[in-house]
């Protein structure tokens, strides 16, 4: 997808989805934080865009790094001056060389779904390299449709294939409210993995 063009034109429909799905996403994050000690630890928001979820994670007490390929998105995230969050222009397929340190939690809302097979494998290698023992990875991604090349989408098998060193702990349907056509036909899914 041409995210640079989308940000340049101010077209960010995923932010409307973030608002519409806020309760569901909040519940997933509540579950993620249950039983964890405080402070919660370091979180990496993969494909953070303008920092919508980085801000939410920081508000909840995570020490957050938001990473995105598009400088304009990162500039907008930085302009929010979010206490507890920092932002970096970077590629989720090159995490090992990004010098970010290790993380306890990875969040990916809508980034992995746009990667090809080679990129997905590199992503998996990167999050594995950056994960502290016991880390978790929570992803919300479109499922594959005939329009996959335009709007992205991945199957559960493809997600698992990219993360061979992670333990799948749950998958569940995500809401479609707030998604316009054809995104509302993609059967978005939550996936959660843990790093043994
Ligand atoms: C659907 S948007 C979601 C943004 C944000 N997670 C949100 O929900 O507001 C996907 C984001 O992934 C970013 N992205 C796509 N490929 C990337 C890559 N290889 N490395 C880093 N970011 C990437 C895009 O620039 C875009 O901001």
Image (cartoon, helix red, strand yellow):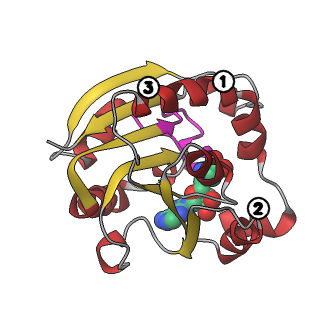
Q: Which residue is mark 2?
A: 6
**Residue sitting at 58 percent across and 52 percent down?**
58
Which tag, 2 or 3, sits closer to the chain's start? 2
Q: Tell me which corner region of the image, top left, top right, bottom left or bottom right, holds residue 159.
A: top left
Q: Nearer the viewer, mark 2 or mark 3?
A: 3
Q: Nearer the viewer, residue 175 or 22?
A: 22
Q: Tell me which corner region of the image, top left, top right, bottom left or bottom right, holds residue 25.
A: top right
Residue 188 percent across, percent down from the top left: 54, 28
Residue 141 colored magenta? Answer: yes
Mark-to-mark CA distance, 1 and 2: 26 Å
Q: Are marks 2 and 3 in contact (CB under 8 Å)?
A: no
Q: Quadrant of the C terminus?
A: top left
- In the structure shown, which secondary structural element does the residue marked by tag 3 occupy? helix
Q: Which residues are magenta?
A: 140-155
Q: Is mark 1 within 8 Å of ligand 1?
A: no
Left or right position of 4 against 40: right
- In the structure shown, which secondary structural element does the residue marked by tag 2 occupy? helix
- In the structure shown, which secondary structural element does the residue marked by tag 1 occupy? helix
**Residue sitting at 49 percent across and 51 percent down?**
62
Prevailing SS of the magenta stretch: loop
Left or right position of 102 against 61: left
Which tag, 1 or 3, sits closer to the chain's start? 1
Q: Nearer the viewer, residue 7 or 97?
A: 97
- What numbered label is drawn on residue 23? 1
Residue 45 percent across, percent down from the top left: 50, 55
Q: Nearer the viewer, residue 6 or 99?
A: 99
Q: Quadrant of ligand 1?
A: bottom right
């Amino acid at each position: 997808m041409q995210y640079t063009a989308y940000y340049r034109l101010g077209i960010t429909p995923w932010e409307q989805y973030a608002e519409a799905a806020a309760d569901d996403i909040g519940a997933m994050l509540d579950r993620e934080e249950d039983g964890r000690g405080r402070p919660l630890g370091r979180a990496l928001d993969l494909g953070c865009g303008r920092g919508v979820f980085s801000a939410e994670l920081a508000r909840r007490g995570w020490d957050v790094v938001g990473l995105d390929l598009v400088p304009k998105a990162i500039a907008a995230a930085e302009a929010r001056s979010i206490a507890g969050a920092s932002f970096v222009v970077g590629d989720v397929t090159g995490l090992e060389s990004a010098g970010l340190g290790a993380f306890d939690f990875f969040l990916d809302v809508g980034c992995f779904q746009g990667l090809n097979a080679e990129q997905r494998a590199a992503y998996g290698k990167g999050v594995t390299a950056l994960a502290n023992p016991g880390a978790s990875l929570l992803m919300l991604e479109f499922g594959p449709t005939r329009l996959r090349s335009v709007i992205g989408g991945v199957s559960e098998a493809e997600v698992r294939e990219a993360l061979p060193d992670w333990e799948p702990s749950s998958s569940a349907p995500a809401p479609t409210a707030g998604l316009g056509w054809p995104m509302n036909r993609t059967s978005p899914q939550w996936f959660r993995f843990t790093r043994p």
